[in-house]
Amino acid sequence: MSQPVVNQSIPRRRRRRRGSAESPPGTVVTYLRVSTSEQALSGLGLEAQRATVAAYAERKGLTIVGEHCDEGISAKSLRGRPAALAALAAVRAGGAAGLLVAKMDRLSRSVVDGAGLMEQAAREGWALHFADLDIDTGTPAGEMAANIIISGSQYERRLISQRTRDALAAKRARGERLGAAPSLPLEITRRIVAERANGMTFQAIADGLMADGVATARGKARWYPATIKAVTTSDNAAEVA
């Protein structure tokens, strides 16, 4: 039995994107994401995704013309993922005929975001490839299947979030310490809290610390927005506030 084909050609019902040149057929940009700083530092999560999209592209006869990667970012929506927005912008500008991700949940675990992306792809005439699903999101059946899977992912994310809140509440009730490890110097915690209070973004704070050669609590040279956020919500931050 032949395998289903995922958006290898743009259906005739799709419109050409307004204001952009026709994209080279069979071209894609890839989007990769790992949600924790540890995964970003090890590189294992990114390499696994990179291998998955490369194998998919070879199997489907697609040409990868660009890569966008969010490292250490676990934002719930696309608005908090700059590389994802850049990848979408590249496709919409005509730089490629489609967007390829290794797993659907790397791009979206939100019903609103996922459904909106599929609708946008169909309306504007670009392909949306999910290597883990191997379904055509341009067909009614494929779109329905993808929406079901996105709904399941969102449900799982919300369950995990609720379990985390319950666990943290239980720790607080027992008087246990929460948040970043106390090995981070107090003056660094104070600096992070002050810069955040002055309106700086997590990324800007991280960039500043790296520019000044400040090490993380674990002695690492690289700071991530998620690490900065963890410091600002820790018990250490409450003590210096």
Image (cartoon, helix red, strand yellow):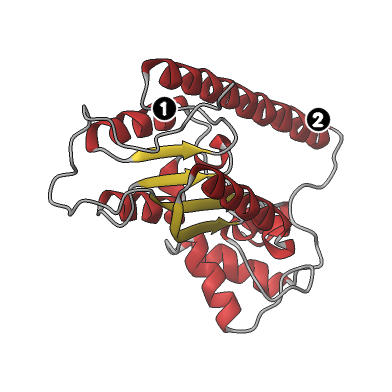
Quadrant (top left/top right/bottom left/bottom right) for the C terminus: bottom right
Residue of label 2: 170
Q: Earlier in the sequence, mark 1 or mark 2?
A: 1
Quadrant (top left/top right/bottom left/bottom right) for the N terminus: top right
Outermost residue, left direction?
19
Q: Is residue 58 visible?
A: yes
Which residue is at a point 19% across and 44% down the rendered structure image?
17
Provide the secondary structure element on which disc 2 rests: helix
The quadrant holding residue 29 is bottom left
Outermost residue, bottom direction?
212
- Asked if residue 163 lies left or right of residue 144, the reply is right
Give the mark toward the camera: 1 or 2. 1
Which residue is at a point 44% across and 55% down the rendered structure image?
63
- Asked if residue 172 lies left or right of residue 154, the reply is right
Q: Nearer the viewer, residue 36 or 176?
A: 36
Image location (x, y in percent) of residue 124: 23, 38
Residue of label 1: 137
Q: Does 8 appear above or below 1? A: below
Image location (x, y in percent) of residue 100: 47, 45
* Kind of residue at badge 1: Thr
Outermost residue, front direction?
1
Q: CA distance from mark 1 to mark 2?
A: 42 Å
Q: Is residue 238 visible?
A: no
Mark 1 surroundings: few (<14), some (14-19) or many (≥20) residues within 10 A: many
Q: Does 232 appear above or below 162? A: below
- Asked if residue 69 lies left or right of residue 241, the reply is left
